[in-house]
Amino acid sequence: MKKPKLLIIVLFQNLGDERTYFAKSPAPPVSGALLAALTPSIVEIELLHEMIRPINYETDANYIALSFMDFCAAHAKEVAKRFREKGKKVIAGGRYASTYPEEIEDYMDATVVGEAEKIWPIVVHDLVNNRLKKLYYAPFAPPLDNIPPPRYDLIEKDFTVPVVTEATRGCIYKCSYCQLNINPAPHRKRPIADVVNDLSSTQKLPLLKRKIAMLQDNNLGGDLAYAKNLLREIAKLKLWSLGVQFSFDCLHDDEFIDLLEQAHCGLAFIGLESLNEPSLAFVHKKQNKTAEYKELFMKLKKRGILTFTGMMIALDEDTEEYYDKLPDKLEEIDPSSILLSISIPIPGTPFHKLVKEEGRITDENLAHYEGDHLVFQPKKVTKEQVFSAYKNINKKFYSWRNIIRRWWRFISAAHFKGNIFKRLFRAVFLSAMMIKISIFQRHHARMKVYEMQSS
């Protein structure tokens, strides 16, 4: 007897059919592939990332699982409506569904609240046996042991890096803009053997895609002793490149940086957020010190590690003078790439509470809370100044002239290890990675933000 089919969709298109944007992202989020791994074998599975391909509403799937962030909540309701009109059962989960289940439960056949590991198999069995409940509550902050490897084989071939997983969840810091602080859970760690198993469970992938991996932790460095032990084990896998995410203060620990190099880390995502000290203080990001940025970035460059850094504008202490100086400051500290976004007062965060109480929210449309729109009035800059700064910073930073200059500074500073062939391979490989990330950011700014300003 043929199994029923479950289609897992990771939503992304927040602005409707007329404003679809298919990203040139090198890697998917881990959520969809992990949910597929947790799904019992009583159903056939298909995985769709709306980031890179549209939803097929004529699918032969019997059941639909939607995973989405805040900015896709309205879109999720429309998607669920279309599928339910076709007789499909629709289940919602993810960060927004877990935080505000009451906002979406009437639009879904079932809503899963919390982390999926302990509850998802129960949901699927209830689904297949026609006893689905409206709400399922997972245990809060359970241990992270015995989680299976994500289903990398189901991830679309469009992604250069399908091997994505996580070693930890949560963060030890309390930045006021961060969604993790709505219902904060403790920083938790997976068994190191389980993480290594994830990175090794890649037999169905071609060689190139088996040798590149990414840890999508909020802050791998939340427990540096654990992170170091993990990196020692990952080093034994002899990956071509590993991507990691951690807080900036971790770079004070030279042993941690050495172990990143030994694990063949090629890309470090670090949240700078601002080069303006008063703006950092405003969002309670006390672990960042702007005077240290240049020196600490150089530590990574010398070890041949690219830096991809999160940057926000439209913080309350930002000024027009700061925006005018920011392109030159970025050149001085020299990150390999930046992810520039407009600050988001995510509902439920301390940041949102503040601007809401002060009557500064100007846009309640949750679809605009993705970092491309300005949804509140900052204290010291105008909307026009924010968008002008966004365009100016991106255009200067991602001009081909400046991309090439940064590439040359990186290659000149890096001390690649091994014989001549290994050094040359790593230089070429990381150069290609840097160019790909730069193209992704140029494309996003041009297609999502510049176009929006002109419309």
Image: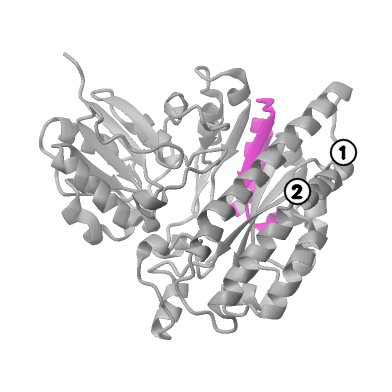
Q: Tell me which amino acid carries mark 1.
A: His
In the image, residue 315 lies at what x, y percent? 57, 74
Q: Which residues are magenta?
A: 222-250
Residue highlighted by disc 1: 415
| Secondary structure type for disc 2 | helix
Total numbered labels placed on residues in the image: 2
* Residue found farthest to the top: 1
In the image, residue 412 lies at what x, y percent? 89, 43
Q: Nearer the viewer, mark 2 or mark 1?
A: 2
| Left or right of residue 180, residue 8 in this image | left
Tell me the quadrant of the picture where the N terminus can be found: top left
Label located before the other in sequence (2 or 1): 2
Residue 227 among magenta residues: yes
Asked whether residue 243 appears in the rendered view, the answer is yes
**Above or below 320: residue 163:** above
Looking at the picture, tell me which residue is in the foreground, 132 or 384. Answer: 384
The answer for how far apart the CA atoms under marks 2 and 1 are is: 24 Å
Residue 257 among magenta residues: no
Q: Tell me which amino acid carries mark 2.
A: Trp
Looking at the picture, tell me which residue is in the foreground, 256 or 54. Answer: 54
Residue highlighted by disc 2: 400
In the image, residue 216 lies at what x, y percent? 54, 44
* Residue found farthest to the front: 455
Crowdedness near tag 1: few (<14), some (14–19) or many (≥20) residues, C-alpha within 10 Å? some
Crowdedness near tag 2: few (<14), some (14–19) or many (≥20) residues, C-alpha within 10 Å? some
